Image: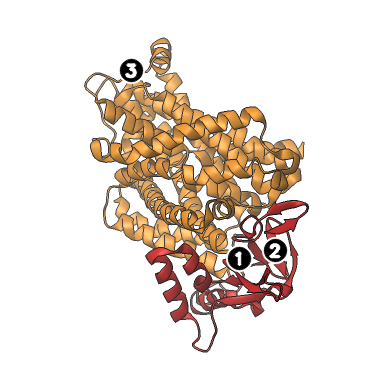
Amino acid sequence: MTEWQHQVCDANDLLLDRLILDCDGQPAGMVDDLELTETPGSALVVSAILCGPTALGPRLGGRIGTWWLAIGRRLRPLDDPYPVRIPFGDVVALDRRQLTVRRPGAENKTWRLRDWVYEKVIRRIPGGTR
Amino acid sequence: MKRLLSLALGVMTAIGGFVDIGNLVTSGVTGARFGLSLVWALAFGTLAMTLYGEMSGRITAIAGRPVFHLVRERLGVRMAMVNLAASLLLNLLTVAAELGGVGLALYLASSISYILWVPIIGFLVWFCIWRIPFNVIDNVFGLLGLALVVFVVALVRLHPDWHAMGAAAIHPVVPAGEGHATWFFYAVTLIGACVVPYQAFFFSSGVIEEGWSEKNLLEVRVNALVGFPLGGALSLGIMAAAVPVLEPRGIEVDHLGQVALPVTAALGKVGLIIALVGFFAATFAAAVESALSSGYILAQYFGWTWGKYRTPARAPRFHAACLITVILATGLVLTTIDPVKITVISVALGAAAIPLTFFPVLVVANDREYMGRHVNKGWVNVLAMLVFIVLVIVSVATVPLLFWTKAGQ
Protein backbone atom coordinates (compact mmCIF):
# COMPACT_ATOMS: atom_id res chain seq x y z
CA MET A 1 0.00 0.00 0.00
CA THR A 2 1.25 3.46 -0.86
CA GLU A 3 -0.01 6.87 0.01
CA TRP A 4 -1.12 8.53 -3.19
CA GLN A 5 -2.45 12.04 -2.95
CA HIS A 6 -3.83 11.34 0.53
CA GLN A 7 -5.73 8.37 -0.81
CA VAL A 8 -4.76 4.83 -0.01
CA CYS A 9 -4.55 2.71 -3.12
CA ASP A 10 -2.68 -0.44 -4.03
CA ALA A 11 -0.39 -1.23 -6.94
CA ASN A 12 -3.32 -2.88 -8.66
CA ASP A 13 -5.20 0.40 -8.87
CA LEU A 14 -2.17 2.38 -9.81
CA LEU A 15 0.32 0.40 -11.84
CA LEU A 16 -0.61 -3.06 -13.04
CA ASP A 17 -1.89 -3.33 -16.61
CA ARG A 18 -1.12 0.30 -17.39
CA LEU A 19 0.35 1.40 -20.70
CA ILE A 20 4.08 2.17 -20.80
CA LEU A 21 5.07 5.07 -23.04
CA ASP A 22 8.66 5.59 -24.11
CA CYS A 23 10.43 8.98 -24.19
CA ASP A 24 8.89 9.72 -27.63
CA GLY A 25 5.37 9.02 -26.40
CA GLN A 26 5.16 5.70 -28.28
CA PRO A 27 3.57 2.67 -26.59
CA ALA A 28 6.39 0.45 -25.30
CA GLY A 29 4.32 -2.29 -23.70
CA MET A 30 2.18 -2.89 -20.66
CA VAL A 31 3.02 -3.19 -16.98
CA ASP A 32 2.67 -6.97 -16.93
CA ASP A 33 4.05 -7.45 -13.44
CA LEU A 34 6.05 -5.68 -10.74
CA GLU A 35 9.31 -6.57 -9.05
CA LEU A 36 9.24 -5.91 -5.32
CA THR A 37 12.41 -5.73 -3.24
CA GLU A 38 12.66 -5.81 0.51
CA THR A 39 14.51 -2.84 1.94
CA PRO A 40 16.54 -3.03 5.18
CA GLY A 41 13.55 -1.66 7.10
CA SER A 42 11.68 -4.72 5.79
CA ALA A 43 9.35 -2.55 3.74
CA LEU A 44 8.61 -3.67 0.19
CA VAL A 45 9.37 -1.20 -2.58
CA VAL A 46 8.69 -1.48 -6.28
CA SER A 47 12.16 -1.88 -7.80
CA ALA A 48 11.26 -2.65 -11.43
CA ILE A 49 8.48 -3.05 -13.94
CA LEU A 50 8.36 -6.44 -15.61
CA CYS A 51 7.12 -6.85 -19.18
CA GLY A 52 6.56 -9.44 -21.83
CA PRO A 53 5.16 -12.97 -21.95
CA THR A 54 7.52 -14.25 -19.25
CA ALA A 55 6.02 -11.67 -16.86
CA LEU A 56 2.44 -12.05 -18.05
CA GLY A 57 2.38 -15.86 -18.03
CA PRO A 58 2.56 -16.31 -14.26
CA ARG A 59 -0.14 -13.69 -13.79
CA LEU A 60 -2.47 -15.47 -16.22
CA GLY A 61 -2.09 -18.58 -14.09
CA GLY A 62 -3.24 -22.09 -14.88
CA ARG A 63 -2.15 -24.08 -17.89
CA ILE A 64 -2.50 -21.15 -20.31
CA GLY A 65 -0.17 -19.11 -18.09
CA THR A 66 2.41 -21.89 -17.99
CA TRP A 67 2.29 -22.20 -21.78
CA TRP A 68 2.52 -18.46 -22.20
CA LEU A 69 5.61 -18.36 -19.99
CA ALA A 70 7.17 -21.37 -21.75
CA ILE A 71 6.65 -19.90 -25.21
CA GLY A 72 8.06 -16.54 -24.13
CA ARG A 73 11.06 -18.23 -22.52
CA ARG A 74 11.85 -20.33 -25.58
CA LEU A 75 11.52 -17.46 -28.05
CA ARG A 76 13.91 -15.14 -26.22
CA PRO A 77 17.64 -15.08 -27.08
CA LEU A 78 19.38 -17.75 -24.99
CA ASP A 79 21.65 -15.44 -23.03
CA ASP A 80 18.88 -13.04 -22.09
CA PRO A 81 17.59 -12.94 -18.55
CA TYR A 82 13.82 -12.99 -18.29
CA PRO A 83 11.41 -11.27 -17.86
CA VAL A 84 12.20 -7.88 -19.39
CA ARG A 85 13.00 -5.52 -16.54
CA ILE A 86 12.58 -1.76 -16.56
CA PRO A 87 14.20 -0.34 -13.40
CA PHE A 88 11.73 1.84 -11.55
CA GLY A 89 14.29 4.64 -11.62
CA ASP A 90 13.72 4.92 -15.38
CA VAL A 91 10.11 5.93 -14.84
CA VAL A 92 9.87 9.68 -15.27
CA ALA A 93 6.13 10.20 -14.87
CA LEU A 94 3.14 8.17 -13.88
CA ASP A 95 -0.53 8.63 -13.30
CA ARG A 96 -3.41 6.19 -13.14
CA ARG A 97 -3.62 5.90 -16.90
CA GLN A 98 -0.05 5.45 -18.06
CA LEU A 99 3.57 5.76 -17.15
CA THR A 100 6.43 7.24 -19.12
CA VAL A 101 9.96 5.86 -19.14
CA ARG A 102 13.19 7.66 -19.89
CA ARG A 103 14.52 5.43 -22.67
CA PRO A 104 13.28 5.14 -26.27
CA GLY A 105 11.25 2.06 -27.13
CA ALA A 106 13.89 0.73 -29.51
CA GLU A 107 16.29 0.24 -26.59
CA ASN A 108 13.58 -1.63 -24.79
CA LYS A 109 13.54 -5.38 -25.11
CA THR A 110 9.75 -5.23 -25.23
CA TRP A 111 10.07 -4.30 -28.89
CA ARG A 112 11.79 -7.53 -29.91
CA LEU A 113 8.62 -9.05 -31.36
CA ARG A 114 7.93 -5.78 -33.10
CA ASP A 115 11.37 -5.76 -34.71
CA TRP A 116 11.09 -9.42 -35.69
CA VAL A 117 7.66 -8.93 -37.31
CA TYR A 118 8.99 -5.90 -39.16
CA GLU A 119 12.10 -7.69 -40.46
CA LYS A 120 10.42 -10.97 -41.39
CA VAL A 121 6.98 -9.86 -42.60
CA ILE A 122 6.13 -6.20 -42.96
CA ARG A 123 9.38 -5.02 -44.62
CA ARG A 124 8.95 -7.65 -47.36
CA ILE A 125 5.49 -6.47 -48.40
CA PRO A 126 5.55 -3.66 -51.00
CA GLY A 127 4.94 -0.40 -49.19
CA GLY A 128 6.01 -1.87 -45.87
CA THR A 129 9.11 0.28 -45.48
CA ARG A 130 7.17 3.54 -45.44
CA MET B 1 -20.69 26.02 -41.42
CA LYS B 2 -17.63 23.82 -41.83
CA ARG B 3 -18.32 22.33 -38.41
CA LEU B 4 -21.91 21.62 -39.41
CA LEU B 5 -20.79 19.91 -42.61
CA SER B 6 -18.32 17.74 -40.76
CA LEU B 7 -21.00 16.84 -38.21
CA ALA B 8 -23.41 15.87 -40.98
CA LEU B 9 -20.74 13.82 -42.71
CA GLY B 10 -19.96 12.06 -39.44
CA VAL B 11 -23.60 11.20 -38.85
CA MET B 12 -24.06 9.90 -42.38
CA THR B 13 -21.00 7.67 -42.17
CA ALA B 14 -22.15 6.46 -38.73
CA ILE B 15 -25.49 5.41 -40.26
CA GLY B 16 -23.74 3.54 -43.06
CA GLY B 17 -21.26 2.09 -40.59
CA PHE B 18 -23.96 0.81 -38.25
CA VAL B 19 -25.54 -1.43 -40.87
CA ASP B 20 -23.51 -4.49 -41.82
CA ILE B 21 -24.15 -8.07 -42.93
CA GLY B 22 -25.53 -8.89 -39.47
CA ASN B 23 -28.26 -6.24 -39.73
CA LEU B 24 -29.03 -7.06 -43.37
CA VAL B 25 -29.46 -10.77 -42.70
CA THR B 26 -31.23 -10.62 -39.33
CA SER B 27 -33.60 -7.82 -40.40
CA GLY B 28 -34.44 -9.63 -43.66
CA VAL B 29 -34.88 -13.03 -42.01
CA THR B 30 -37.00 -11.79 -39.11
CA GLY B 31 -39.13 -9.48 -41.26
CA ALA B 32 -39.97 -12.33 -43.64
CA ARG B 33 -40.57 -14.88 -40.90
CA PHE B 34 -41.95 -13.00 -37.91
CA GLY B 35 -43.33 -9.78 -39.42
CA LEU B 36 -42.77 -6.84 -37.13
CA SER B 37 -43.20 -8.83 -33.92
CA LEU B 38 -39.47 -8.48 -33.11
CA VAL B 39 -39.14 -4.70 -33.51
CA TRP B 40 -38.64 -4.49 -29.73
CA ALA B 41 -35.40 -6.48 -30.01
CA LEU B 42 -34.05 -4.21 -32.76
CA ALA B 43 -35.02 -1.14 -30.73
CA PHE B 44 -33.34 -2.52 -27.62
CA GLY B 45 -30.17 -3.44 -29.52
CA THR B 46 -29.98 0.05 -31.02
CA LEU B 47 -30.50 1.65 -27.62
CA ALA B 48 -27.74 -0.48 -26.08
CA MET B 49 -25.27 0.29 -28.86
CA THR B 50 -26.08 4.01 -28.82
CA LEU B 51 -25.71 4.26 -25.05
CA TYR B 52 -22.48 2.29 -24.76
CA GLY B 53 -21.10 3.57 -28.06
CA GLU B 54 -21.46 7.15 -26.81
CA MET B 55 -19.81 6.22 -23.50
CA SER B 56 -16.84 4.49 -25.09
CA GLY B 57 -16.38 7.32 -27.60
CA ARG B 58 -16.56 9.88 -24.79
CA ILE B 59 -14.04 7.98 -22.66
CA THR B 60 -11.63 7.72 -25.59
CA ALA B 61 -11.93 11.40 -26.42
CA ILE B 62 -11.51 12.58 -22.82
CA ALA B 63 -9.12 10.04 -21.29
CA GLY B 64 -7.37 9.01 -24.51
CA ARG B 65 -8.00 5.36 -23.69
CA PRO B 66 -9.58 3.02 -26.26
CA VAL B 67 -11.97 0.32 -25.07
CA PHE B 68 -9.65 -2.65 -24.90
CA HIS B 69 -7.18 -0.82 -22.66
CA LEU B 70 -10.03 -0.40 -20.21
CA VAL B 71 -11.00 -4.04 -20.58
CA ARG B 72 -7.55 -5.16 -19.45
CA GLU B 73 -7.27 -2.49 -16.78
CA ARG B 74 -10.63 -3.16 -15.19
CA LEU B 75 -11.25 -6.87 -15.77
CA GLY B 76 -7.71 -7.94 -14.91
CA VAL B 77 -5.41 -9.94 -17.16
CA ARG B 78 -7.30 -13.22 -16.99
CA MET B 79 -10.86 -12.12 -17.73
CA ALA B 80 -9.50 -9.70 -20.31
CA MET B 81 -7.66 -12.61 -21.95
CA VAL B 82 -10.95 -14.55 -22.10
CA ASN B 83 -12.59 -11.50 -23.65
CA LEU B 84 -9.67 -11.08 -26.08
CA ALA B 85 -9.87 -14.71 -27.24
CA ALA B 86 -13.66 -14.57 -27.61
CA SER B 87 -13.56 -11.23 -29.42
CA LEU B 88 -10.81 -12.35 -31.79
CA LEU B 89 -12.81 -15.46 -32.68
CA LEU B 90 -15.97 -13.41 -33.17
CA ASN B 91 -14.08 -10.87 -35.27
CA LEU B 92 -12.83 -13.70 -37.44
CA LEU B 93 -16.37 -15.02 -37.95
CA THR B 94 -17.56 -11.47 -38.62
CA VAL B 95 -14.86 -10.74 -41.21
CA ALA B 96 -15.70 -14.07 -42.88
CA ALA B 97 -19.42 -13.24 -42.87
CA GLU B 98 -18.78 -9.75 -44.31
CA LEU B 99 -16.47 -11.12 -47.01
CA GLY B 100 -19.15 -13.65 -47.89
CA GLY B 101 -21.69 -10.79 -47.93
CA VAL B 102 -19.58 -8.73 -50.36
CA GLY B 103 -19.16 -11.88 -52.48
CA LEU B 104 -22.92 -12.47 -52.52
CA ALA B 105 -23.57 -8.83 -53.47
CA LEU B 106 -21.12 -9.15 -56.37
CA TYR B 107 -22.64 -12.51 -57.33
CA LEU B 108 -26.09 -10.91 -57.51
CA ALA B 109 -24.67 -8.19 -59.75
CA SER B 110 -22.52 -10.42 -61.97
CA SER B 111 -23.85 -14.02 -61.68
CA ILE B 112 -20.25 -15.12 -61.03
CA SER B 113 -20.12 -17.43 -57.99
CA TYR B 114 -19.32 -15.62 -54.75
CA ILE B 115 -16.52 -18.08 -54.00
CA LEU B 116 -14.56 -16.72 -56.98
CA TRP B 117 -14.99 -13.17 -55.70
CA VAL B 118 -13.91 -13.88 -52.15
CA PRO B 119 -10.09 -14.03 -52.67
CA ILE B 120 -10.22 -10.78 -54.66
CA ILE B 121 -12.33 -9.10 -52.00
CA GLY B 122 -10.03 -10.41 -49.27
CA PHE B 123 -7.09 -8.85 -51.08
CA LEU B 124 -8.92 -5.52 -51.53
CA VAL B 125 -9.92 -5.44 -47.86
CA TRP B 126 -6.30 -5.94 -46.84
CA PHE B 127 -5.15 -3.37 -49.40
CA CYS B 128 -7.52 -0.79 -47.88
CA ILE B 129 -6.08 -1.51 -44.43
CA TRP B 130 -2.53 -1.34 -45.80
CA ARG B 131 -2.74 1.76 -47.97
CA ILE B 132 -5.98 3.78 -47.87
CA PRO B 133 -6.26 6.49 -45.18
CA PHE B 134 -8.70 5.85 -42.35
CA ASN B 135 -11.07 8.73 -43.04
CA VAL B 136 -11.26 7.93 -46.76
CA ILE B 137 -12.49 4.39 -46.01
CA ASP B 138 -14.85 5.68 -43.35
CA ASN B 139 -16.38 8.42 -45.51
CA VAL B 140 -16.52 6.74 -48.93
CA PHE B 141 -18.06 3.45 -47.78
CA GLY B 142 -20.19 5.08 -45.09
CA LEU B 143 -21.79 7.36 -47.68
CA LEU B 144 -22.22 4.59 -50.26
CA GLY B 145 -23.85 2.50 -47.54
CA LEU B 146 -26.60 5.12 -47.38
CA ALA B 147 -27.83 3.61 -50.67
CA LEU B 148 -29.68 1.21 -48.37
CA VAL B 149 -32.22 4.00 -47.81
CA VAL B 150 -33.72 2.53 -50.99
CA PHE B 151 -35.40 -0.03 -48.67
CA VAL B 152 -37.32 2.77 -46.97
CA VAL B 153 -38.33 4.18 -50.38
CA ALA B 154 -39.45 0.71 -51.45
CA LEU B 155 -41.46 0.31 -48.27
CA VAL B 156 -43.36 3.53 -48.96
CA ARG B 157 -43.95 2.56 -52.61
CA LEU B 158 -45.35 -0.82 -51.53
CA HIS B 159 -48.22 0.96 -49.71
CA PRO B 160 -48.29 -1.44 -46.78
CA ASP B 161 -51.04 -1.45 -44.19
CA TRP B 162 -49.29 1.01 -41.86
CA HIS B 163 -51.88 0.63 -39.14
CA ALA B 164 -51.57 -3.16 -38.95
CA MET B 165 -47.78 -2.93 -39.06
CA GLY B 166 -47.73 -0.41 -36.23
CA ALA B 167 -50.03 -2.60 -34.17
CA ALA B 168 -47.84 -5.67 -34.78
CA ALA B 169 -44.75 -3.75 -33.69
CA ILE B 170 -46.35 -2.47 -30.48
CA HIS B 171 -48.13 -5.71 -29.50
CA PRO B 172 -45.59 -8.43 -30.18
CA VAL B 173 -46.95 -11.97 -30.33
CA VAL B 174 -45.20 -15.12 -31.46
CA PRO B 175 -46.62 -15.88 -34.95
CA ALA B 176 -48.69 -19.07 -35.30
CA GLY B 177 -46.61 -22.12 -36.10
CA GLU B 178 -43.42 -20.73 -34.57
CA GLY B 179 -41.93 -21.85 -31.25
CA HIS B 180 -41.11 -19.42 -28.47
CA ALA B 181 -37.49 -20.60 -28.44
CA THR B 182 -37.00 -19.80 -32.14
CA TRP B 183 -38.66 -16.43 -31.72
CA PHE B 184 -36.39 -15.55 -28.80
CA PHE B 185 -33.34 -16.88 -30.65
CA TYR B 186 -34.02 -14.44 -33.50
CA ALA B 187 -34.58 -11.67 -30.96
CA VAL B 188 -31.06 -12.41 -29.68
CA THR B 189 -29.64 -12.26 -33.21
CA LEU B 190 -31.27 -8.86 -33.78
CA ILE B 191 -29.78 -7.55 -30.53
CA GLY B 192 -26.44 -9.12 -31.43
CA ALA B 193 -26.48 -7.53 -34.88
CA CYS B 194 -26.68 -4.09 -33.24
CA VAL B 195 -24.18 -4.60 -30.40
CA VAL B 196 -21.43 -6.42 -32.30
CA PRO B 197 -18.20 -6.24 -30.26
CA TYR B 198 -16.14 -5.05 -33.22
CA GLN B 199 -18.30 -1.94 -33.58
CA ALA B 200 -17.51 -0.89 -30.02
CA PHE B 201 -13.77 -1.46 -30.56
CA PHE B 202 -13.80 0.24 -33.92
CA PHE B 203 -15.79 3.27 -32.79
CA SER B 204 -13.52 4.01 -29.83
CA SER B 205 -10.26 3.30 -31.67
CA GLY B 206 -11.59 5.47 -34.50
CA VAL B 207 -11.65 8.44 -32.11
CA ILE B 208 -7.87 8.08 -31.73
CA GLU B 209 -7.37 7.40 -35.45
CA GLU B 210 -9.12 10.68 -36.19
CA GLY B 211 -6.92 12.44 -33.62
CA TRP B 212 -9.97 13.60 -31.66
CA SER B 213 -9.79 14.92 -28.12
CA GLU B 214 -12.00 16.76 -25.65
CA LYS B 215 -12.75 19.58 -28.08
CA ASN B 216 -14.22 17.09 -30.57
CA LEU B 217 -16.59 15.67 -27.97
CA LEU B 218 -19.55 17.07 -29.91
CA GLU B 219 -18.61 15.12 -33.06
CA VAL B 220 -18.13 11.90 -31.11
CA ARG B 221 -21.45 12.22 -29.29
CA VAL B 222 -23.48 13.32 -32.31
CA ASN B 223 -22.08 10.37 -34.31
CA ALA B 224 -23.26 7.94 -31.65
CA LEU B 225 -26.45 9.66 -30.47
CA VAL B 226 -27.79 10.54 -33.92
CA GLY B 227 -25.97 8.20 -36.30
CA PHE B 228 -26.57 4.92 -34.48
CA PRO B 229 -30.35 5.39 -33.93
CA LEU B 230 -30.71 6.36 -37.61
CA GLY B 231 -28.73 3.21 -38.48
CA GLY B 232 -31.20 1.26 -36.35
CA ALA B 233 -34.05 2.95 -38.21
CA LEU B 234 -32.49 1.84 -41.49
CA SER B 235 -32.40 -1.76 -40.20
CA LEU B 236 -36.04 -1.35 -39.25
CA GLY B 237 -36.76 -0.20 -42.82
CA ILE B 238 -35.16 -3.38 -44.20
CA MET B 239 -37.20 -5.47 -41.79
CA ALA B 240 -40.46 -3.66 -42.55
CA ALA B 241 -39.96 -3.83 -46.32
CA ALA B 242 -39.81 -7.62 -46.06
CA VAL B 243 -43.19 -7.78 -44.35
CA PRO B 244 -45.61 -6.93 -47.21
CA VAL B 245 -43.61 -8.86 -49.85
CA LEU B 246 -42.04 -11.89 -48.22
CA GLU B 247 -44.18 -12.72 -45.18
CA PRO B 248 -47.55 -13.36 -46.94
CA ARG B 249 -45.84 -15.60 -49.52
CA GLY B 250 -44.01 -17.58 -46.84
CA ILE B 251 -40.61 -16.87 -48.43
CA GLU B 252 -37.86 -17.66 -45.94
CA VAL B 253 -34.69 -15.65 -46.33
CA ASP B 254 -31.65 -17.89 -46.54
CA HIS B 255 -29.76 -15.91 -49.14
CA LEU B 256 -28.76 -12.26 -49.34
CA GLY B 257 -30.60 -11.98 -52.67
CA GLN B 258 -33.94 -12.58 -50.98
CA VAL B 259 -33.34 -9.63 -48.65
CA ALA B 260 -33.40 -7.40 -51.76
CA LEU B 261 -36.64 -8.88 -53.17
CA PRO B 262 -38.91 -6.18 -51.70
CA VAL B 263 -36.83 -3.50 -53.42
CA THR B 264 -37.03 -5.31 -56.74
CA ALA B 265 -40.78 -5.75 -56.30
CA ALA B 266 -41.32 -2.05 -55.62
CA LEU B 267 -38.69 -0.31 -57.72
CA GLY B 268 -37.54 -2.84 -60.31
CA LYS B 269 -34.00 -3.16 -61.62
CA VAL B 270 -32.87 0.35 -60.71
CA GLY B 271 -33.91 -0.27 -57.11
CA LEU B 272 -32.06 -3.56 -57.10
CA ILE B 273 -28.87 -1.93 -58.40
CA ILE B 274 -29.02 0.73 -55.67
CA ALA B 275 -29.68 -1.94 -53.03
CA LEU B 276 -26.69 -3.95 -54.27
CA VAL B 277 -24.45 -0.87 -54.08
CA GLY B 278 -25.64 -0.47 -50.48
CA PHE B 279 -25.00 -4.16 -49.70
CA PHE B 280 -21.53 -3.93 -51.20
CA ALA B 281 -20.55 -0.75 -49.37
CA ALA B 282 -21.98 -1.80 -46.00
CA THR B 283 -20.41 -5.25 -46.01
CA PHE B 284 -17.07 -4.14 -47.49
CA ALA B 285 -16.68 -1.35 -44.93
CA ALA B 286 -17.61 -3.75 -42.16
CA ALA B 287 -15.06 -6.29 -43.41
CA VAL B 288 -12.35 -3.63 -43.20
CA GLU B 289 -13.55 -2.42 -39.79
CA SER B 290 -13.83 -5.86 -38.21
CA ALA B 291 -10.40 -6.89 -39.53
CA LEU B 292 -8.93 -3.65 -38.14
CA SER B 293 -10.65 -4.37 -34.83
CA SER B 294 -8.65 -7.57 -34.40
CA GLY B 295 -5.46 -5.52 -34.73
CA TYR B 296 -6.83 -2.87 -32.37
CA ILE B 297 -7.72 -5.19 -29.52
CA LEU B 298 -4.53 -7.27 -29.72
CA ALA B 299 -2.43 -4.11 -29.74
CA GLN B 300 -4.41 -2.55 -26.91
CA TYR B 301 -4.19 -5.65 -24.74
CA PHE B 302 -0.43 -6.06 -25.18
CA GLY B 303 0.54 -2.39 -25.41
CA TRP B 304 1.75 -2.49 -29.03
CA THR B 305 1.97 0.53 -31.29
CA TRP B 306 -1.19 0.54 -33.41
CA GLY B 307 -3.37 2.52 -35.75
CA LYS B 308 -3.67 3.35 -39.39
CA TYR B 309 -2.33 6.82 -38.60
CA ARG B 310 1.04 5.10 -38.06
CA THR B 311 2.85 3.70 -41.09
CA PRO B 312 3.20 -0.11 -41.22
CA ALA B 313 6.87 0.22 -40.28
CA ARG B 314 5.86 1.98 -37.07
CA ALA B 315 3.09 -0.49 -36.17
CA PRO B 316 4.29 -3.80 -37.64
CA ARG B 317 2.57 -6.13 -35.17
CA PHE B 318 -0.76 -4.34 -35.64
CA HIS B 319 -0.56 -4.60 -39.42
CA ALA B 320 0.53 -8.24 -39.25
CA ALA B 321 -2.47 -9.03 -37.00
CA CYS B 322 -4.87 -7.41 -39.49
CA LEU B 323 -3.26 -9.29 -42.37
CA ILE B 324 -3.51 -12.64 -40.57
CA THR B 325 -7.18 -11.97 -39.72
CA VAL B 326 -8.02 -11.26 -43.36
CA ILE B 327 -6.16 -14.38 -44.55
CA LEU B 328 -7.85 -16.66 -41.99
CA ALA B 329 -11.30 -15.19 -42.71
CA THR B 330 -10.84 -15.58 -46.47
CA GLY B 331 -9.83 -19.20 -45.87
CA LEU B 332 -12.92 -19.75 -43.73
CA VAL B 333 -15.28 -18.48 -46.46
CA LEU B 334 -13.47 -20.56 -49.08
CA THR B 335 -14.44 -23.72 -47.17
CA THR B 336 -17.89 -22.95 -48.80
CA ILE B 337 -19.47 -22.64 -45.36
CA ASP B 338 -22.77 -20.73 -45.78
CA PRO B 339 -22.06 -16.99 -45.16
CA VAL B 340 -25.64 -16.40 -43.98
CA LYS B 341 -25.27 -19.15 -41.38
CA ILE B 342 -21.93 -17.73 -40.16
CA THR B 343 -23.64 -14.36 -39.83
CA VAL B 344 -26.49 -15.70 -37.70
CA ILE B 345 -24.12 -17.63 -35.42
CA SER B 346 -21.61 -14.78 -35.09
CA VAL B 347 -24.22 -12.18 -34.13
CA ALA B 348 -25.78 -14.53 -31.57
CA LEU B 349 -22.38 -15.27 -29.97
CA GLY B 350 -21.57 -11.56 -30.15
CA ALA B 351 -24.60 -10.82 -27.99
CA ALA B 352 -23.28 -13.36 -25.48
CA ALA B 353 -19.80 -11.83 -25.32
CA ILE B 354 -20.67 -8.14 -25.18
CA PRO B 355 -21.17 -7.70 -21.39
CA LEU B 356 -17.43 -8.38 -20.87
CA THR B 357 -16.70 -5.34 -23.01
CA PHE B 358 -19.49 -3.05 -21.81
CA PHE B 359 -18.86 -3.58 -18.09
CA PRO B 360 -15.44 -1.85 -17.97
CA VAL B 361 -16.81 0.92 -20.20
CA LEU B 362 -19.60 1.61 -17.71
CA VAL B 363 -17.17 1.57 -14.77
CA VAL B 364 -14.67 3.97 -16.34
CA ALA B 365 -17.43 6.30 -17.57
CA ASN B 366 -18.05 6.94 -13.86
CA ASP B 367 -14.38 7.39 -12.87
CA ARG B 368 -13.77 11.06 -12.08
CA GLU B 369 -10.01 10.74 -12.33
CA TYR B 370 -10.39 9.67 -15.95
CA MET B 371 -13.43 11.63 -17.00
CA GLY B 372 -13.36 14.82 -14.89
CA ARG B 373 -16.64 16.65 -15.34
CA HIS B 374 -17.64 14.37 -18.23
CA VAL B 375 -18.66 11.43 -16.01
CA ASN B 376 -22.02 9.76 -16.67
CA LYS B 377 -25.11 11.58 -15.51
CA GLY B 378 -27.37 9.78 -13.04
CA TRP B 379 -30.13 8.91 -15.49
CA VAL B 380 -27.58 7.58 -18.00
CA ASN B 381 -26.29 5.22 -15.32
CA VAL B 382 -29.79 4.01 -14.46
CA LEU B 383 -30.54 3.34 -18.12
CA ALA B 384 -27.12 1.78 -18.72
CA MET B 385 -27.53 -0.55 -15.71
CA LEU B 386 -30.96 -1.68 -16.93
CA VAL B 387 -29.59 -2.31 -20.40
CA PHE B 388 -26.63 -4.15 -18.90
CA ILE B 389 -28.85 -6.46 -16.83
CA VAL B 390 -30.87 -7.38 -19.92
CA LEU B 391 -27.64 -7.98 -21.88
CA VAL B 392 -26.38 -10.33 -19.15
CA ILE B 393 -29.66 -12.29 -19.29
CA VAL B 394 -29.35 -12.42 -23.10
CA SER B 395 -25.75 -13.58 -22.80
CA VAL B 396 -26.70 -16.44 -20.46
CA ALA B 397 -29.62 -17.49 -22.66
CA THR B 398 -27.83 -17.31 -26.02
CA VAL B 399 -25.88 -20.57 -26.11
CA PRO B 400 -28.75 -22.78 -24.85
CA LEU B 401 -31.07 -21.11 -27.40
CA LEU B 402 -28.49 -21.60 -30.16
CA PHE B 403 -28.36 -25.36 -29.58
CA TRP B 404 -32.04 -25.77 -28.66
CA THR B 405 -33.23 -24.17 -31.88
CA LYS B 406 -30.30 -25.45 -34.01
CA ALA B 407 -29.44 -21.84 -34.85
CA GLY B 408 -33.04 -20.89 -35.58
CA GLN B 409 -34.18 -23.67 -37.88
Front: mark 2 or 3: 2
Q: Is there any visible trace of residue B269 in the rendered image? A: no
Tell me where residue B250 sits by quadrant. Answer: top left
Packing grade of label 1 (10 A; few <14, some 14-19, many >=20) is many
| Image location (x, y in percent) of residue B95 | 41, 52
Residue at 51% in and 54% down: B293
For the residues bearing labels 1 and 2, Cβ distance under 8 angstroms:
yes
Judged from this view, the residue extending furthest toward the bottom is A79
Q: Nearer the viewer, residue B274 or B43?
A: B43
Which chain is disc 1 placed on?
A
Q: Chain of mark 3?
A: B
In front: mark 3 or mark 1?
A: 1
Q: Which chain is red?
A: A
- Say whether mark 1 and mark 3 are on the same chain: no
What label sits on residue B190 in the rendered view? Answer: none
Crowd rating for badge 3 (residues with CA inside 10 Å; few <14, some 14–19, many 20+): some
According to the picture, the residue beneath numbered tag 3 turns out to be: B173
Q: Amino acid at mark 2?
A: Leu
The CA distance from mark 2 to mark 3 is 55 Å
The hue of chain B in the figure is: orange
Real-space Cα separation, disc 3 to disc 1, in angstroms: 52 Å
How many neighbours does mark 2 have within 10 angstroms: few (below 14), some (14-19), or many (20 or more)? many
Q: CA distance from mark 1 to mark 2?
A: 9 Å
- SS state under label 3: loop
Residue denoted by label 2? A99
Q: Quadrant of the N terminus of chain B?
A: top right
